[in-house]
Amino acid sequence: MSNTKKRLAIGFDDIHPQRGYGYCDEYAKRLRALIKYGVRPTLFCTPVWHSRYNIMDSPEWVKKWKGVEWMLHGLTHQNPRLRGDSQHLEYAGMDFENSVKSLSKAKELLQKSTGQKIKGVRFPGWQDPTNVNEVLKKSGLLRHYVHEQGDELPVYETDGIVKVGYTCLLHELPQKVVGDLFVHAHISEGYDGKAMNALNQKNFENLLSFLKKNKDQLEFVTVSELVEEKK
Ligand SMILES: [Zn+2]
């Protein structure tokens, strides 16, 4: 029965058209393999990465991603009020009005460029704006969030979702499917030397064999479907 199955979603962060971060043949090949297998990947996109790479200027790049769900990952992924390591926390300390304005712009750009209705957001660095619930309500967006308890081992979340982090070695995947699974990955080259881990060749093969082994117990969903279910 399908209702006894555990759900599995895979999300990719930091997707944007800057060369090296968004699309290369190697990843496209792996993504296609996952899609062929039934996985329904969600791409978390930053529509104006660092205020420079506007997704509207790259229609050909958008077309290359087929069979994916698009969700938001901020507007610029940069916070001019912060310095150093925290600079990527775009919404840290942002007030209601500015957050709604920023998300509305991001949503409009991503909807226009992909032709999809954008259902949700994952805030850069998992950092919520002030009054996050009101902001989400006003923006008509779901939020994808998991506790950042380390990326090297699977994390068992209180809502039953098992989070597999992007630096997690996928041979650490649970042997048994005990709960819904969320696999957190990046698609980027040379981002920090670790960013590719969830999809490096060995891990990718481990993931595929995990999927194969547990196929009968899994139902592949998009991240928005997983979040909607857990609301
Ligand atoms: Zn990010």
Image (cartoon, rainbow, N blue to C red):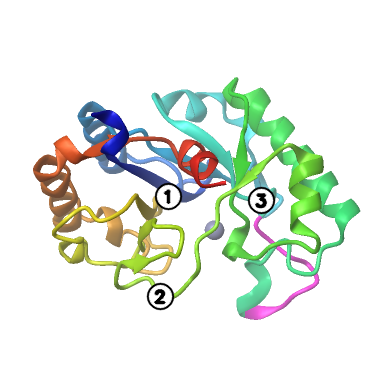
User: Relative to 75, is 14 on the left or the right?
Assistant: left
Ligand 1 closer than 8 Å to the CB at disc 3?
yes
Cα gap from disc 2 to disc 3, whole angstroms: 22 Å
| 1 vs 2, front mark | 2
Q: Give residue 203's quadrant in the image.
A: bottom left
The residue carrying mark 3 is 74
Residue 210 location, x and y as percent?
14, 49
Residue drawn at 32 percent across, 58 percent down:
196
Residue 112 location, x and y as percent?
67, 24
| 3 vs 1, front mark | 3
The magenta span reads: 77-84
Callout 3 touching callout 1 (CB < 8 Å): no
Q: Secondary structure at mark 2?
A: loop
Cα gap from disc 3 to disc 1, whole angstroms: 19 Å
Vertical comparison of 181 with 34: above or below:
below
Name the kind of residue labelled 3 in the image.
Gly
Q: Nearer the viewer, residue 213 or 70?
A: 213
Residue 20 is tagged as 1
Vertical comparison of 49 with 158: above or below:
above
Name the kind of residue labelled 2 in the image.
Gly
Q: Earlier in the sequence, mark 3 or mark 1?
A: 1
Q: Earlier in the sequence, mark 2 or mark 3?
A: 3
Name the kind of residue labelled 1 in the image.
Gly
Count residues near mark 2 (Cα–Cα under 10 Å), then give few for <14, some for 14-19, many for 20+: some
Q: Nearer the viewer, residue 143 or 69?
A: 143
Residue 44 location, x and y as percent?
52, 45
The residue carrying mark 2 is 150
Cα gap from disc 1 to disc 2, whole angstroms: 25 Å
